[in-house]
Amino acid sequence: MKKSSARKRRPTKTSRSEFYILRLYIAGQTPNSIAAIANLKKICEDKLQGKYRIEVVDLLKKPQLAKGDQIIAIPTLVRRLPPPVKKIIGNLSKTESVIVGLDLQPAR
Amino acid sequence: MRGARPKVIRSSLAKAPTGIQGLDEVTGGGLPKGRVTLVCGSAGCGKSLFAMEFLVHGAVRYGEPGVCMDFEETEAKLRANVASLGFDLRDLTKRKKLLVDFVAVERNQIAESGEYNLDGLFIRLAHAVKAIKAKRVVLDSIEALFSGLVDSTILRAELRRLFHWLEDHKLTAVVTGEAGEQTLTRHGLEEYIADCVISLDHRVTEQISTRRLRIVKYRGTSHGTDEYPFLIDREGISVVPITSLELAHKASTDRVSTGIPALDEMMEGKGFFRGSSVLVSGSSGTGKSSLAASFTKAACARGEVCLYFAFEESPSQILRNMRSVGINLEPWVKKGILHFHAMRPTSIGLEAHLAIVHKLIEQFRPKVVVIDPITNLVVASGTYSIKSMLMRLVDFLKVQQITSMFTNLTFSGDPQERTAAAVSSLMDTWIVLRDSKPNGRPRRELYVLKSRGMAHSRDPRELIVSDRGMELGKVLKDHSLATPVAGPGGVKVPE
C-alpha cells in the first residue's frame, strides 16, 4: 500500500478529525521502550505524515499517570485521538498489527 | 483475654493475622507474613470477601495498611463488601488505611504487537504501596489478565515476577483465583504459590448449602487437612475451628444446680459438674423442654449468661409454654442474661448450624448452653455427622467450661432411640424421661441413667410438672424404666 494513495483518498472535510494524538507509555529506557518509540515514529512517518503527535510518558517519572489510561503492560500505545480510544501493547515490532490496531487502513 | 482457647497449631513462622474469626486459630496465627497466599474457589464462594476482610482487618486492627488491586469487581460491589464488615471504603481510603486501584482489562480494546511486560501493573502497585506505606496487598482476581492478554507465556513469566516482587518487598499478599475443572484454579495459579493455598467451597447437598474452607498447603506450618465449615453473615466470614484433637480440657469440680432441688439431691445433693454435658432424652410430652427451662432459670438466677438454641419452637412459644408450668424466663431475657436463638434445622446445613452456634457462643460468652432439641438436627443430617458435630461442639463447650444440656426426642423402638445411644457416649450425664400408665394413671418418670464422676441415685422418680414448676415425687417401685444394659453399641435402655 502506498502512502501517497492513502493520503489522497482521504476526503478533506474529515481531515480535522484525522489528526492523531498518540501517547506511548514506557518505563525507563528499556530495549522494548526504545524499540517501540522507533517503530512508532517510522509507522507514523509512513502513514500519518504531518497529521500526528506522539507523547511519550515515562511511568518511572510519572507513575500516577498509569491509572488514568489503565496501563498494565509496557510499552502501551494509546490512540487518544481520533476517538474511539485504542490501545496497542508491545514494542510495536509487528507493523501490520499496529496499522490495524490504530485503524490506519485507508478507507475502502 | 479469653482464657482457655484451643490452640490447634503452634508455629514459629511469622504470621499476619487475618482477623477472620476462627481462621487465625486454624492457621496458628494467620497467613504467612511477607508471603503470597492463594485463595481459590468457584464463583460466589466468598474469596473476594475473604481478601477484603484480610485487608480491612489488617488496616484497622493490626496497623497494616493495604492495597487492593481489583481486576473485576465494580466499586459499588467492593464498597458493599467493605460496608458489610462495618467499614466505609471512602473513610478508610481517606485515612490512608486502604487504597483500591481498579484495573480494567478490556480485551476488545487491546491489540498486541511485539514484546511487552507488565511493568505498568508493577508501577501502579508500587505507587499505591508507597502512597499509604502498605504492608498488605490483595490481587482480586489476577486471573482476569488471562482473558485480557493473548500472550500467556509472557503473562505467566510476569506473574512469577510479580509474586517475587511482592515477597521482595515483604508484603503479605492474598491472590484470588477462580476454581478450575481439574485444577485448583482455572489458570493453574497454584503452581506459582509455594507458601499457602486455601480453597473455599460452597456445596449444596439435599437443598442445604454448606460452605467449607480447606488449607491445601501451608509451608512451614502443620495444619489440619480437614475441611472447616464457615459462615458468611452480616459480619463477614467466620470459620469454625475443629477444636483440640486431644482431650485436654480440665475437669471442674465445681457444681451447678439442675434447677430442681430433688434432682440435685439425686446427684450428691449438688447437681451437674460445671462444664459437663447433659443429655435429656424422652418421648414427646415427657417434660424435656421444661427440664431444660428449669436448668436455664436456675443458671439465670445465679447470674450466669445462658444461650438457648431452639430448633423446634419460637422463643415466644417457649416462653409462653414455660410460663404455664410456672417457669418464667421472660425477666431474664429482658435483663440480657438469657439469649434465645431459634432456627429451623433444615434451613441450613449442619456445619452452618455449628458455625452459628460457635459464633454466638463467642459473642455472648455464656456459662450455660441449651440445645433443644438435637433430634431435629438429626433429621437434617445423618447419625454419623450429628455425632461428629456434637463431638466438636461438646469439646468446644468443655474447653470453655460451659455447662451444656441437649434434649433429645425419642420414640420407643424407633431408630431415634439408637441415636440417643450414639450421642450419649459424648455426654457426661444422661437423664431419661418417660411416660407410663401404671394402673391407668398417666405419669412422668425420671431416671438418671448415668452421670460421670459422681455417685448419683439410680432410683427412678416420678416427675411432677405443675404450674409451680418441676418437682420430683417419691422413688418409684413399680417403675416402667428398665435397668440399662451394657452391650455392643453402648448402654441402652431396653424396651
Image: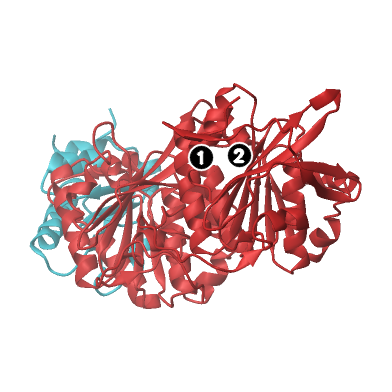
Chain colours: A cyan, B red
Tell me the amino acid under the disc marked 1: Val
Residue B494: x and y, percent? Answer: 57, 27
Viewer-closest of B70 and A71: B70
Determine whether, in the image, residue B389 is placed left or right of residue B476: left
**Residue B61 disc label:** none
Q: Secondary structure at mark 2?
A: loop
In this figure, which residue is indicated by the disc labeled 1? B423
Q: Secondary structure at mark 1?
A: helix
Determine whether, in the image, residue B433 is placed left or right of residue A90: right
Q: Residue at x 31, y 57 (%)?
A: A71
Residue B446: x and y, percent? Answer: 71, 41
Q: Quadrant of residue B181?
A: top left
Query: If you read the primary sequence from the N terminus, does the residue marked by circle 2 or circle 1 appear first?
Result: 2
Circle 2 Cα neighbour tier, 10 Å, few/some/many (<14 / 14–19 / ≥20): many
Q: How many marks?
A: 2
Q: Is residue B431 visible?
A: yes
Determine whether, in the image, residue B259 is placed left or right of residue A73: right
Whether the residues at callouts 2 and 1 have beta carbons within 8 Å, the answer is yes
How far apart marks 2 and 1 lie (CA) works out to 10 Å
Viewer-closest of B328 and A67: B328
Tell me the amino acid under the disc marked 2: Ile
In this figure, which residue is indicated by the disc labeled 2? B374
Determine whether, in the image, residue B264 is placed left or right of residue B238: right
Depth-wise, is mark 2 or mark 1 nearer the camera? 1
